[in-house]
Amino acid sequence: MAAFGLHEVLGDTGTNSKALSRPIHPKLVASRSETYRSSTGLQVTPDEGLKGNCADVIIICDIHLNLDDSPEGRWPEEIAWVRRHFDHGSLVCSTCSGSVLLAEAGLLDGLEAASHWAMADLFRDRYPSIKFRPERILCDSGRNGQLITTGGASSWQDLALYLIGRFCGAKEAARVAHLFLLGDRGYGQLPFASMARPRQHNDAVISRIQEWLVDNYVTPNPVTAMVGRSGLSERSFKRRFSAATGYTPVEYVQALRIEEAKQMLATDEMGIEEISAAVGYEDSTFFRKLFKRRAGVTPAQYRQRNRLSSLLV
């Protein structure tokens, strides 16, 4: 749980004989001051409620939010507390899905923001003015450095080191990183992302095409084939497909192909050129460029990382 990890790491800063800076005094804050259980079943005892004085830095940790749930109207007390801190000049941060609360507060409008990659649909549909950055682990979201968002469940580690470096210096950040074995994830979170779930919709024609595409994504000129099977004009098909799924037809095909390529890279012994052809790309150079754009790493890097992960499981 990010809150406990942040509390431990930040709380160690500046507290022992080898410390190189002043200490940080983290506190757990919640809308209720009594002990409660988190969504994962852990017992949480807040240090204080939301009525205390403004802190120099606040961090909104990951929020339990089912993908079918709407955040509308949720967390009114917490949002008021965040806005009070922001207006006071505090540094406002979030980890993982915590950025949804900042989005609901209106603080990210027109800005870049990171979050867990699984929140991509929510940001696309509910917060279209926010420039969602699924590839980023840590994102300076603007307002003169007053807003920091991070992506991925373990991104609290990157935020902790960022805050220690910003307020306590690089040497202390390096000491804490060495002590807690906090590593680098310079590739971002795209290598861990899967195809974002398409929107739920009632367009029967598009649903039929999606079902056909699952088994036929390697078809040459797939968009042309999809248009032909739909019985619609090309312009009408593309418009309806994008409205129904949130993807353009070509983006949807590319996403399916890259997902299949990821599975092959992690489990098969086929060469990259063979995998490229197997998912519908005869031009392996184009495939490599497309894969890196969508996954954040080259096919070879993805294979190396995921083969190692599978051996460790």
Image (cartoon, rainbow, N blue to C red):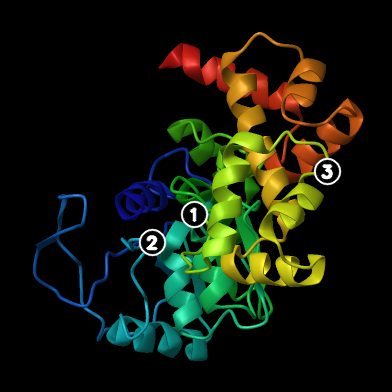
The residue identified by callout 1 is 118
Foreground residue, 99 or 279?
279
**Looking at the image, can residue 184 be seen?**
no
Looking at the rendered structure, which numbered label has been put on residue 313?
A: none
Q: Do labels 2 and 1 touch, CB within 8 Å? A: yes
* x and y percentages locating residue 63 in the rendered image: 34, 63
The residue identified by callout 3 is 221
Looking at the rendered structure, which numbered label has been put on residue 67?
A: 2
* x and y percentages locating residue 220 in the rendered image: 81, 37
Q: Secondary structure at mark 2?
A: loop
Q: Mark 1: which amino acid?
A: Ala
Q: Mark 2: give few (<14), some (14-19) or many (20+) Cα within 10 Å.
A: few
Q: Quadrant of residue 249?
A: bottom right
Q: Mark 2: which amino acid?
A: Leu
Q: Is residue 5 positioned above or below 129 on the image?
A: above
Q: Do labels 2 and 3 touch, CB within 8 Å? A: no
* x and y percentages locating residue 53 in the rendered image: 32, 85
Choose mark 2 or mark 3, whichever is in front: 3
Going 24% across and 72% down the picture, which residue do you hit?
30
Q: Mark 3: which amino acid?
A: Asn
Foreground residue, 55 or 235?
235
Q: Quadrant of residue 306?
A: top right
